[in-house]
Image (cartoon, rainbow, N blue to C red):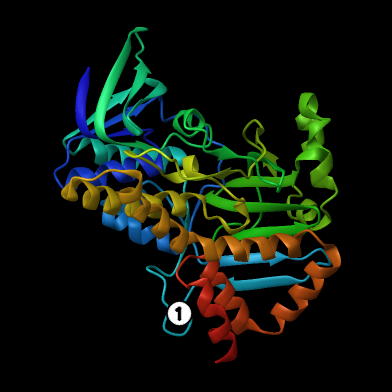
Amino acid sequence: MSHADVVIVGAGPAGAATAILLAEHGLGVTVLDRGPRTRPKVCGEYLSPEAGRVLDRLGVLKAVDAGGAAALAGMRITAPDGTVLDARYGAVGAFRPYRDHAMGVSRAALDGALLERVRALPVDLREGVRVTDVIVEHGRVVGVRAAEVTGAVVAVRARVVIAADGRASVIAHRLRCRRPHPLARMALVTYVTGVRDCRDVGEIFVDPPDYAILNPLAPDRINLSLVVPLAHAAAWRARLEDFFVARIKQLPHLSRRLAGAGRVAPLSSLGPLAYRVVPPREGGVLLVGDAAGFYDPFTGEGIFTALRSAELAADAVLGALRAGDVSAAALAVYHRARRAAFADKERLTRVLQTVIGRRRLANLVAHWLAARPRVLAALLGVIGDYVPPRALPRLLLS
């Protein structure tokens, strides 16, 4: 049995970021990860401009840039009737992005840069370890049980346990925190090459009930994500390749954009995408990143949410350990901060989901935004995480 100040389950963006922040404050941190980090991820691989700020704070932004991250100056959105909305990241009133671009970066490059930073710190990183259960005593999580590659089962105890083990979080499941979500969608993801002039902006194609995203990662490698209702794909689970090819043909603007392009990777799928996670009743535990829930990828919030929730979790853990109180009540400061950070954007995403789910409404909104570039710029600032959603009404009226 081993002991630590904090044990973090999962070494993806949320777990690695939390480990870095806590280790920099001198805490004893153990990270347990199933690994290997090189395995493929179903991910849009988009980082908003504000994600660059967190990566810089973590000391990995330079490495991510050097690893070939594509600078994305903005977004191009195509409505069902072909109306095109072009917007660029930049100052919106008093709000300015950390950098004037988002990034397209492979998960292998991002995860690798974060793990290299973890390895440079006094962190006990254990890869090839599968967490199987939590240890709860007197209403508080005090550690985890895990299986090593040798088959040995070990217990790792800590003052605080942080679940950063993704959407299939063992800890969220064991603590009965996970809930279904009414938004039932599936993502189908692959990589393509040969898409003309697809380098400096992310491209979104709205064609209800579907939407698709082209996210450039390198000069000639693009992440192609198609999001469809789960019910439409369910009958095709054994033939998702056929479903994907047929569905792409039925999105005319995307299909024309992909003319001459070629697939360079197998198709991956994930669904349902959205799920809710309620805060655990037990003390001594926090959920970060996808382990704390996921809504929908349209606004590309996944990786930024992971990184920002790591910042909030680190602040909460440092305060709780200094006060000597890791009860559920003491750690609730994290849940309040997380709600304050993300609730408004989730509400906006619900509105956007309503819009992109209805063809006529999507076209009307696209026409309205096309005539109001200042409003479109403000909306892109919200999507880019540097304009607070609550500032939208004031910006629109100014």
- Residue sitting at x 68%, y 64%: 352
Question: In the rendered view, does 207 fall on the left or right side of 65?
Answer: right
- The image quadrant that residue 299 belongs to is bottom right
Q: Quadrant of the C terminus?
A: bottom right
Q: Quadrant of the N terminus?
A: top left
- Residue sitting at x 63%, y 82%: 373
- Residue sitting at x 60%, y 64%: 347
| Crowding near the residue tagged with mark 1, few <14, some 14–19, many ≥20 C-alpha atoms within 10 Å | some
- Along the viewing direction, whichever of 118 and 62 lies nearer the viewer: 118
- The answer, for residue 128, to whether it is visible in the render is no
- Along the viewing direction, whichever of 349 and 113 lies nearer the viewer: 349
Q: Position of residue 230 (x, y in %)?
A: 76, 40
Q: Position of residue 47 (x, y in %)?
A: 47, 55
- Along the viewing direction, whichever of 264 and 89 lies nearer the viewer: 89
- The image quadrant that residue 161 belongs to is top left
Relative height, residue 278 to residue 77 (above, below)? above
Type of amino acid at the residue the image marks with label 1: Ala
- The image quadrant that residue 192 belongs to is top right
Q: Secondary structure at mark 1?
A: loop
Q: Position of residue 124 (x, y in %)?
A: 22, 29
Identity of the residue furthest to the top in this view: 151
- The answer, for residue 56, to whether it is visible in the render is yes
Question: In the rendered view, does 322 fall on the left or right side of 328?
Answer: left
Relative height, residue 79 to residue 95 (above, below)? above
Q: Position of residue 209 (x, y in %)?
A: 80, 53
Identity of the residue furthest to the front in this view: 138
- Along the viewing direction, whichever of 382 and 254 lies nearer the viewer: 382
Relative height, residue 63 to residue 272 (above, below)? below
Q: Give the labeled residue for mark 1.
A: 91
Question: In the rendered view, does 360 fall on the left or right side of 305?
Answer: right
